[in-house]
Amino acid sequence: MLTLRQMRYFDALATTLHFGRAAKMTNVSQPALSAQIMEMEADLGIRLVERGRAGVILTQQGEALLPEIRAILLSVDGLYDRARQSAGVLEGRLRLGIIPTVAPYLVPTLIPMLRTRYPKLDVELRELLTTGCIEDVKHGKLDCAIIALPHNDDSLRSCTLFEDRFLIASADDENTVLYSPMTEAQVDMDRLLLLEEGHCLRDQALAVCGSTAGRRVANYGATSMATLLQMVSHGMGITLIPEIAVRDERTRNRMRIVPFAEPQPSRRIGLVWRPRSGRNNDQEALAALVTEAAAQLLSKDA
Amino acid sequence: MLTLRQMRYFDALATTLHFGRAAKMTNVSQPALSAQIMEMEADLGIRLVERGRAGVILTQQGEALLPEIRAILLSVDGLYDRARQSAGVLEGRLRLGIIPTVAPYLVPTLIPMLRTRYPKLDVELRELLTTGCIEDVKHGKLDCAIIALPHNDDSLRSCTLFEDRFLIASADDENTVLYSPMTEAQVDMDRLLLLEEGHCLRDQALAVCGSTAGRRVANYGATSMATLLQMVSHGMGITLIPEIAVRDERTRNRMRIVPFAEPQPSRRIGLVWRPRSGRNNDQEALAALVTEAAAQLLSKDA
DNA sequence: CAGCATGATAATTTTATCCTATCGATAATT
DNA sequence: AATTATCGATAGGATAAAATTATCATGCTG
C-alpha cells in the first residue's frame, strides 16, 4: 500500500533528482530512501525514476504523477493547520438545544452577543423539550443544551447558569384576587393554567403550587408560554410566569404580575453537556455568556 | 507524522461510528484501530471522536477534517489508476529528436501514422544535430532520437530503422556530366556541395567521395538539405542526396538524380535511447512504425 | 588506471504495527 | 440489585516495516 512517507521521499527525489541529496533533505539514509522509492514503484507497478550515474531522471509516468502527489502532500500538511485552527474557543459549529420556556426570551439577547464576541461561531439552535435536549446531547446530535436543573441523567454534566424566579400572572381586571406578595397556598388551583405535558415548567408549577394535595387543576395544556399568557390576559385563568419571560410578555399582554412571598420559588436554568465532549472551553465561555445575557434580561424586572 | 493508514482507519470509524465494526471493515483488530486513532489524535493535537457507550460520535473537529481526509484518500486511490493508465504503449508524452537530414522527409509521413495508430500519444518533436540528440537523450531531455548509425556513445542503446541509400544530385542541364550509375571516384570534388559542419551527412558524403585523398571540397556549408538542393538545382554544384529526400525534393527542384554503382553507399538510420529508460515497448512500437513509414517513403523511388 | 560519485545490496538494529487476551465502564436485563 | 453484554482501552509479546552502517558494482573523469 502506498504511504505518505514514500510520497514525501519521492517528492524530495523529484526535487533534488539525486538519491543522496533527497535522503539528506528528508533526514534519512540513502538506502532507506532508495528502498522506499523502489517499493513505491513496485506498488504502483511503474517506474517512477530512471537511475543514471549523473543523478536521476523522472520517467514520463513519474512526471505525470508528481503534481498529484505534491497536491496530496499539501493537503495532508493542510490538515495540521485545519486541526490547529479548529481548536479555538467557540469557533465552528455549536449545536445548542434550549427548552421552549427559555428559548424565546433568552435567544434575542444571547444570539447577538454570541455573534459579536465570537464571530467565528456558527450556532445551530434547536428548541426542544427537556427530554429531547438530554437525548440529543447524549447522542451527539447537540453539543450542549440549556434546560432547567436538576436533570435526572447523571451521564451528563451540567452547571448552573442563572436562577429564574417564578411569579404569578393574571388578567389585569377586577375579577381576580391577587395578593402581593402571595404565598403558594393562595394560588387558586381551579384557575391555574399550565403548559401541555412535557414542559418542565408545568411540573415545576405543580410542584410549587401543589404542595397542598387534592386541589384540582384546569384541564388544559397550552403549547407555549405565549399562548398560555395570552389566555391569562384574556381572563381565562392565572399561571406561573418565569421572571425571564416577564419583560417580553408584558409588552405583549396586559397582565398583572406579582411575586411570591419569600422564599420566592424559582427554577434553576443550567447548561448540560457530555462529560467527554472535550469542549470544556467552549462550554465555559458559553455558560459565562448566557449568565451575562440572563442578568441583563432580569435586571430592573420584578 | 500522520499516515494514510490512520486516515483510512478514521474514515472507516467515521463511517461505522463503531471501533469494532470499523476494525472489521479495515481487516484489522479493534485495538490496532483504536491505537491508530489515538495516535492520529495525538499527532493532530485534537480529539477526533468522542468515545461513548453507544459507539462513537465525531467531534466537531473530526467532522471538519473528515471531508478533507476522504478527499486525500480518494486522490491516493486515484494515483493507482493514473499509474496503470500511464503504463500503456505509446501513451502520454514522447519526446523525439530527429536529425535535420531526416526530419523534414520522415515527419510528414510519420506523424500522421502516429496520430492514427496511437491517438493517446503526444509527440514532442525536436530537430537536432546528432550530438544534440545524443546529449539530450542521455540527459533525459529526450526519450529517444532518430539519428544516423553508428553512434559513438555506448551508454545509449540503438536499433536500425532503415537503410538510406545515397544518390548524386545535379542540375538538370548540359554542363554537368553524370554517369548513371556512377562510381564514387567519378564525383567531381570541386563541385561537391556539402552541409555545414555538424551534420553527419556532411561527414558521410566526405567518407563516400573522399576515399581518394587530396581532392578539394567546395568551401561552403549549407544550413539545410533544402538549401543545398536548391543550390544544386541552380547549377552551383552537385551533392549527395539521401534516398529518403528524393521524392520530396524532386517535387521542388528540377534536378538530375542518379544512383551510385553497386555496392551503393548508404547511411543507416536508427533509433537511440537510454538503456534504462524502461520504455522498451514504446521504443519497439516506434521503431516498427518508423520502419514502416520509411518503407513507404522509399518505395517506387530511384 | 586510479579516484570519485552514484545508487544498489547486505546485515543488523530500531521502530511500527498487529494480535490475543483482558480490563473497566456503561447499558440493558433479570 | 445483581447479572450479562457491549464497547473501547490496555498489556504483553510476536511480526513486519523501516532505518542505519558498511560495502559493492558501475560508470564517469582526470
Image (cartoon, coloured by chain):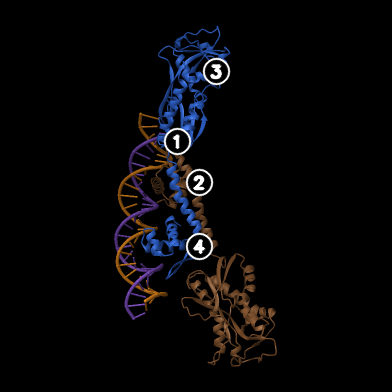
Chain colours: A blue, B brown, C purple, D orange
Residue A251 image label: 3
Residue B67 image label: 2
What's the amino acid at mark 3?
A: Thr
What's the amino acid at mark 2?
A: Pro
How far apart, in angstroms, are the residues tagged by discs 3 and 1? 33 Å
Q: Position of residue C28 (x, y in %)?
A: 45, 34
How far apart, in angstroms, are the residues tagged by discs 2 and 3? 48 Å
Q: Is residue A268 left or right of residue D14?
A: right
Residue occupied by mark 1? A90
Q: Do pointers 4 and 2 mark residues of a single chain? A: no
What's the amino acid at mark 1?
A: Leu
For the residue pair B13 and A2, the one nearer the viewer reads as A2
Query: Which tag, 1 or 4, sits closer to the chain's start?
Result: 4
Q: Quick one: label 2, few (<14), some, or many (20+) residues within 10 Å?
A: few
Q: Chain of mark 4?
A: A
**The quarter of the displayed image where residue B186 is located:** bottom right
Residue A63 image label: 4
Between circles 1 and 2, the one closer to the viewer is: 1
Q: Do pointers 1 and 2 mark residues of a single chain? A: no
Does the rendering let one see residue A214? yes
